[in-house]
Structure formats: C-alpha cells, structure tokens
Image (tube, grey):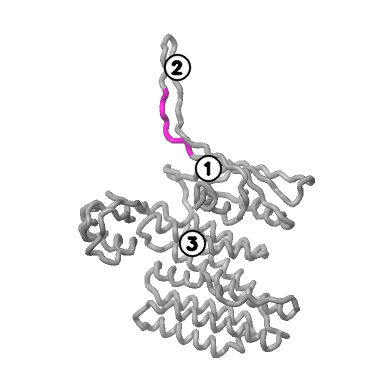
C-alpha cells in the first residue's frame, strides 16, 4: 500500500476540505543564556513545544459557497474540536488565526490558511462544563430536528401502489433490524418481549403509519428506546445501536426522473437517514457513559460514531438539522475519551515464549486479571497455546 493510500480526508469538526500543504511546528522550548567573559553559553530546556499545525487547504465546486459557510462556522466556534489531519490522524485542537482567500480569476474555489494547536489540558483550577449534560442536550436537539425533517418531507400522498409498497418494505426492514439487534441477547426478558411486540405492531399497522409520518417517526423512536432497555451496560447499548449505522445499505436505490420516482426516492432517503441519524446520535449518548477499558478503545468508538454522523451532515442541507448534528459531534469529541478517567493506552508486545495466556498475563501484569482482556482483544482461539513471536495488543504494562 502506497503512502497516498494511507492518507485520510481532511476535516475539522466534521466539515471536509482538501489539503494542499501542511506544516508542523514542534520541538523543545530552549532558552540560550550567554554570560559576560565566558566563551561558552548555557542552553536551558523549558519543556516540549506545544504542537502547532499550519494548513493550507481549499473547498471548491459550483456550490463551494455552502462549503465555505460551513468552514467559517466551525472556524469561529468557541472551544477545541477534532481535526482529522491526513498526515497526523485525529487531533484534539484549538484553532487560531484563519485567512480565507477567493479570486474571480480562478472562481469556484476558496483557499484558506489556518493554524491549529494541540488543545492539551489546563492543570490549574477552573470552572468546568458538564460535558454529559451538554452532549445530552445536543442529542435531544438532533433527535427533534431529525424527526421534524422526516415529518415534513416523508409522504405517500398521491403516490401509486408500487411507490407505497417501496415505503412499506422500509418499515418491515426496520422491524427486522430491531429484532436482529437483540439476537445475541440470550435472556428473553420483559424488555425483549416489549420490543418484539412493538415491532410486530409496527408491521401490522404499516398502512396507517405511512399516512401519518409524525406518528411513524415517533413509533420508530419508541422502538429505539425499547432496544436500549434490553441491555444493562452502556457498552451493549452502544453496540446494539451501531448495528443500524449502515441501515438500508443493501436496498436497491430508487432511480428515475419522473415526479413519482423522485418522491419515492426522497421517501427512501428520508427513512433510511432518519434511522441512521437516530442510531448514531443515540449511540453518542451511550458512549459517553461507557466504561471503556482503554483510551484507544474509547477513541476508536468515538471515531466510528463521528464518521457516521459526518456522513449524515453531508447528506443534509437544512440549517437547523445540520447544526444540531455538528453540535453532537463537537460534544462527543469533548466527552469521549473522558480525560479525567485516566484510561490506559494500548501497546503492542511480542510474546517471548510459547505458553498459555494466563502466564502471559502474569508476566506482563503480575496478575491474572487481564487474561480475559488479552484473549478478547487479540481474538486468541486457543488460550492454552500462544506462540512465541506473536505480536499482541495489551493494556499499558505496569
């Protein structure tokens, strides 16, 4: 795989852009002390320089005004946010000065130069925000805006039978997805029974629900709430919601340019995106209260969720809905990983001698407590035989 294949698309707070040039300012804070009548000087090391990233990027195309507006919005928003840097990956940064240039000679392009700095943390006493409350508020707003978007745009009024059947299939698909999300749950609890009852009614009442979009969207949200009640741990809730991230991906996309086909396609898009939005923003909420075993696990889960929400941001051209999704992503980046939790990192180690996983845990941690994590994290099929030379991932070795 070439180096270009390793690059990630650039974005800040979920808004994409193309990067032309990037500079990294790093190093040590050194102060040179020179003294009278001495031939040598003394250089004092005052610590590491805070990394700074200077990016020259651009947005272009016939609708570049919209892309520029979104960039201006995230560039001027207060507080740090997530920068996806093609060369350095995900960085939590504070933005500095930004200069945006446009020219009538080139046209359809806005070029910007922006400076970002690692956000770090303030080790001195200060007032703090309730990150959980901020995220919860952002999620509630995004759900409300997503429901409004669906209610205002989904409609079967005036459509022929085949177009209505297309919508009916989506309701059935959603019902199946809710049931599939609980298949790994062995215990047939009251919550599982309640969800099964709700999804059966969803299918049985499809004809009536399709004629009342606001009722249909609420019933779908109620099903998500019942799904969350099935699982006790926040981690299980998040994982069950993540099964909806690619909802409808296997459905044949409606094509055609007749008014009926255009409306049928709009209904399909609105239904699928409503399910994906609800699942992704709800998973942002559950992820914020999940006890992750490591910083890397928390970061990877956050990236998975923010990537889904970013796709939804690109699908949307409604200002209120767009802003609500951007706010969820920003709040999630701020809340996960929880910097106050001091989660351990993941590192790779080489197994020195062939042996059982229990002994590996003892060798690394002087305790058997991490054996299950080693087995599960590395997908070890035979814990009684871990071959020497194997590279495995473990929590920070103490």
Query: Whole-percent x and y of residue 177?
Result: 49, 78
Question: How far is disc 2 from disc 3 in space, using C-alphas?
Answer: 52 Å
* Disc 3 packing (10 Å; few <14; some 14–19; many ≥20): some
The residue at which mark 1 appears reads as 117
Q: Which mark is residue 250?
A: none
Start and end of the magenta stretch? Answer: 43-50
Q: Does the magenta portion include 45?
A: yes
The residue at which mark 3 appears reads as 304
Q: Is residue 290 above or below residue 214?
A: above
Query: Whole-percent x and y of residue 46?
Result: 42, 30
Residue 108 in the figure: left or right of residue 207:
right
The residue under the point 59% across, 63% down is 324
The residue at which mark 2 appears reads as 34
User: Answer yes or no: do the residues labelled 1 and 2 have beta carbons within 8 Å?
Assistant: no
Q: Earlier in the sequence, mark 2 or mark 3?
A: 2
Whether residue 174 is visible to the viewer of this picture, yes or no, is: yes
Which type of secondary structure does the marked residue at label 2 adopt? loop
Residue lying farthest front? 1
Residue 356 in the figure: left or right of residue 305:
left
Residue lying farthest top? 37
Query: Whole-percent x and y of residue 9?
Result: 57, 53
Q: Nearer the viewer, mark 2 or mark 3?
A: 3
* Disc 2 packing (10 Å; few <14; some 14–19; many ≥20): few
The residue under the point 31% across, 51% down is 349
Residue 392 in the figure: left or right of residue 250:
left
Q: Earlier in the sequence, mark 1 or mark 3?
A: 1
């Amino acid at each position: 795989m070439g180096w270009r294949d390793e690059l990630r698309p650039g974005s800040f707070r979920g808004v994409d852009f193309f990067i032309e040039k990037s500079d990294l300012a790093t190093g040590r804070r050194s102060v040179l002390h020179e003294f009278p009548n001495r031939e040598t000087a003394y250089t004092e090391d005052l610590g590491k320089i805070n990394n700074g990233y200077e990016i020259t990027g651009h947005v272009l195309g016939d609708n570049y005004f919209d892309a520029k507006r979104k960039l201006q919005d995230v560039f001027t928003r207060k507080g740090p946010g997530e920068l996806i840097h093609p060369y350095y990956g995900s960085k939590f940064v504070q933005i500095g000065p930004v200069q945006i240039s446009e020219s009538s000679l080139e046209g359809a392009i806005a070029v910007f130069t922006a400076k970002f700095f690692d956000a770090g943390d303030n080790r001195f006493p200060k007032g703090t925000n309730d990150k959980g409350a901020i995220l919860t508020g952002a999620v509630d707003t995004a759900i409300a805006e997503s429901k409004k978007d669906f209610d205002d745009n989904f409609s079967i009024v005036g459509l022929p039978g085949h177009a209505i059947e297309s919508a009916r299939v989506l309701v059935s698909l959603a019902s199946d997805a809710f049931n599939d999300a609980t298949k790994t749950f062995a215990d047939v609890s009251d919550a599982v029974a309640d969800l099964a009852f709700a999804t059966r009614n969803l299918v049985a009442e499809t004809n009536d629900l399709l004629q009342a979009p606001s009722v249909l969207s609420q019933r779908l949200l109620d099903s998500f709430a019942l799904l969350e009640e099935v699982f006790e741990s926040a981690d299980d809730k998040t994982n069950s919601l993540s099964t909806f991230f690619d909802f409808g991906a296997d459905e044949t996309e409606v094509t055609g340019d007749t008014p009926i086909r255009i409306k049928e396609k709009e209904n399909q898009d609105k239904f699928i995106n409503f399910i994906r939005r609800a699942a992704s923003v709800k998973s942002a909420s559950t992820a914020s209260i999940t006890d992750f075993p490591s910083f890397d696990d928390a970061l990877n889960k956050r990236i998975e969720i923010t990537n889904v929400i970013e796709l939804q941001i690109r699908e949307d051209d409604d200002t209120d809905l767009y802003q609500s999704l951007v706010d969820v992503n920003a709040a999630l980046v701020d809340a996960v990983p929880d910097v106050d939790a001091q989660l351990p990192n993941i590192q790779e180690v080489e197994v020195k001698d062939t042996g059982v996983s229990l002994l590996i845990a003892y060798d690394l941690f002087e305790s058997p407590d991490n054996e299950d994590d080693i087995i599960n994290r590395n997908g070890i099929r035979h814990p009684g035989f871990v071959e020497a030379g194997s590279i495995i991932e473990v929590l920070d070795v103490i």
